[in-house]
Image: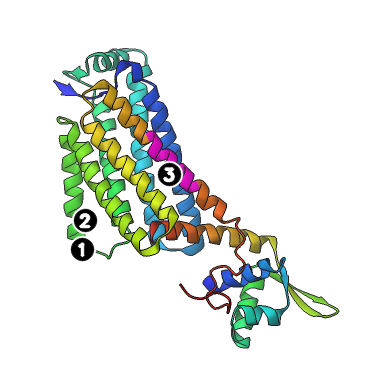
Amino acid sequence: MVKIVLTPEWFIGKDIMIEVFSFLVLIAFVILAYRYYKISNRRRIFYLGVGFGLIALAQLATILTKMVLYYDIGPSEQIGQAIITSNLASSVDFFYYTGFFFHRFLTLLGFYMIYRLPRDRKSIGDYMAVLYFIIISSLLSREIFYIFHLTALFILVLIVEKYAWIYKENNFFNTKILMVAFGLLALSQLIFVLSDVDILFAVANTVELISYSIFLALIIRIWKYGKKKKPYGDNIRYAGNSPK
Amino acid sequence: MEIISDMLAIVQSKNGTIKPTHLMYKANLSHSQMKLYLDELIARSLIKKDDIKTGTMITITSNGREFLFKYNQMREFEKTFGL
């Protein structure tokens, strides 16, 4: 007996809406990162975009899989219903396993990429070790669903800690927003661990929605900033601007 | 890149038009540096030179404004993520 989907029946459809919203926010980050990479040619921006892109793909994988589970007609509907109503299935198509596996794998990989970015380079061995860890977590989560959420929580706590350090250094409000958004995402993973209780699954999804809404607000802030008139730009060569 | 964006920001802050000497002082550049960057900016169609009665004026183009807009966003993005 394998646990596949924990969505309570009354929450079906709403979870997909939240995932679609998250997907769109993540895609917006990817587009921004790509635009800025084209201007600056800085690899870190590119890799940040790839990190968000991987999480976006993960969301897409889960959206497509759930859509088939929830709404597809025919044998898959029966499988879907069995999963939805009882949360349990003795045998499920390869498709569902693959879909959810990619969701877990790409999410963890994306979070890890975002975590790794502003740090110094490490050896290929370090990356391979983490990749192995992520694959094992993704595979084991098929049997024990909360391993994925615990792993995601672990990486997200590292991300929050990293941005807390960056915020300490730059005291920049946007970084604080970013920290809060990732913090809420971490909280949602913690709640997901306990999501055997129906209501907690909905609460975790809602916290995730709030988190992605904050990400969206951050995108809008960055977008609007370009329009702001800065008298002398960041120009520290200008006599009126003293270096910070 | 930073110097170019700073020069554009200075031109924009002066309602889009400035005298070359003023730009040179405000950007704190030497004459040779100024010439080098101006040529680069003109080649990229980010600014244009206009000869008027009182002398030469430098004007930011729509390309220049667009570039500055994206550049400011990029800086904000980088700063946010500590990149």
Please tell me whether mark 1 sits on a helix, a strand or a loop.
loop
Which amino acid does the dot numbered 3 rest on? Phe
Secondary structure mainly formed by the magenta segment: helix
Magenta residues span A209-219
Residue at horizontal 65%, vertical 61%? B65
Q: CA distance from mark 1 to mark 2?
A: 7 Å
Q: CA distance from mark 1 to mark 3?
A: 31 Å
- The answer to whether any part of residue A138 appears in the image is no
Q: Nearer the viewer, mark 3 or mark 2?
A: 3
Please give the residue where the numbered disc 2 appears in the rendered image: A127
Q: Which mark is residue A123?
A: 1
Locate the C terminus of chain A by quadrant: bottom left
The total number of labels drawn is: 3
Sequence order check, earlier mark of 3 and 2: 2
Which amino acid does the dot numbered 1 rest on? Ser
**Chain of residue at mark 3:** A
Q: Quadrant of residue A12?
A: top left
Left-right relation of A125 to B81:
left
- The front one of A8 and A241 is A241
Q: Magenta span has A23?
A: no
Please give the residue where the numbered disc 3 appears in the rendered image: A215
Please tell me whether mark 3 sits on a helix, a strand or a loop.
helix
Q: Quadrant of residue B32?
A: bottom right
